[in-house]
């Protein structure tokens, strides 16, 4: 049985928006030093400028961005759930009874 080589996940080195308002990500190449690829989010799809992405195949760069977006979505859902699970603030009671700061 041969050893299976596991390559590390590519690193997302930057993110922003293009002129059309789409999210873009810069993802470092796993195989070529000092190379990076641009992954663009189109509504519910991702595209990449690497060779595999240009040929319509799923590439590791798109997978890395997808994993990041899923993790961010899940973290946001947990924050919303935690915020809604907080106990309600204790009600304040008013009392119009006269009072004095001087001891009676």
Image (cartoon, helix red, strand yellow):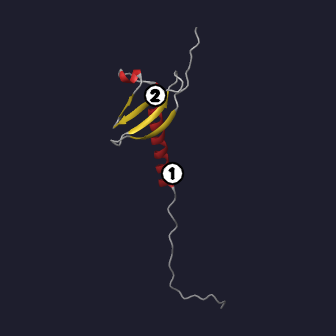
Whole-angstrom CA distance, mark 1 to mark 2, is 32 Å
Which residue appears at 65% of the width and 90% of the height? 102
Which residue appears at 48% of the width and 36% of the height? 68
Q: Determine crowd level at label 2: few under 14, some 14-19, many 20+ residues with C-alpha closer than 10 A.
A: many
Indicate whether 41 appears above or below 100. Answer: above
Q: Position of residue 23 (x, y in %)?
A: 39, 39
Q: Determine crowd level at label 1: few under 14, some 14-19, many 20+ residues with C-alpha closer than 10 A.
A: few
Q: Could you say which is closer to the camera, residue 38 or residue 98?
A: 38
Rendered image quadrant of residue 17: top left
Q: Helix or strand or loop: what does disc 2 sit on?
A: helix
Q: 56 left or right of 59?
A: left
Which of the two discs, 1 and 2, labels the residue nearer the N terminus?
Answer: 2
Indicate whether 96 appears above or below 1. Answer: below
Which residue appears at 52% of the width and 24% of the height? 30
Q: Tell me the residue that label 1 is attached to.
A: 82
Q: Tell me the residue that label 2 is attached to.
A: 61
């Amino acid at each position: 049985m041969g050893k299976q080589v596991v390559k590390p996940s590519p690193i997302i080195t930057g993110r922003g928006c293009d002129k059309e308002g789409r999210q873009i990500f810069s993802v470092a190449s796993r195989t070529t030093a000092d190379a990076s690829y641009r992954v663009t989010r189109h509504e519910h799809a991702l595209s990449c400028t690497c060779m595999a992405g240009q040929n319509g195949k799923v590439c590791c760069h798109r997978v890395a961005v997808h994993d990041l977006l899923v993790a961010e979505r899940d973290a946001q859902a947990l924050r919303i759930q935690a915020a809604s699970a907080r106990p309600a603030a204790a009600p304040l009671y008013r009392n119009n009874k006269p009072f004095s700061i001087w001891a009676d």
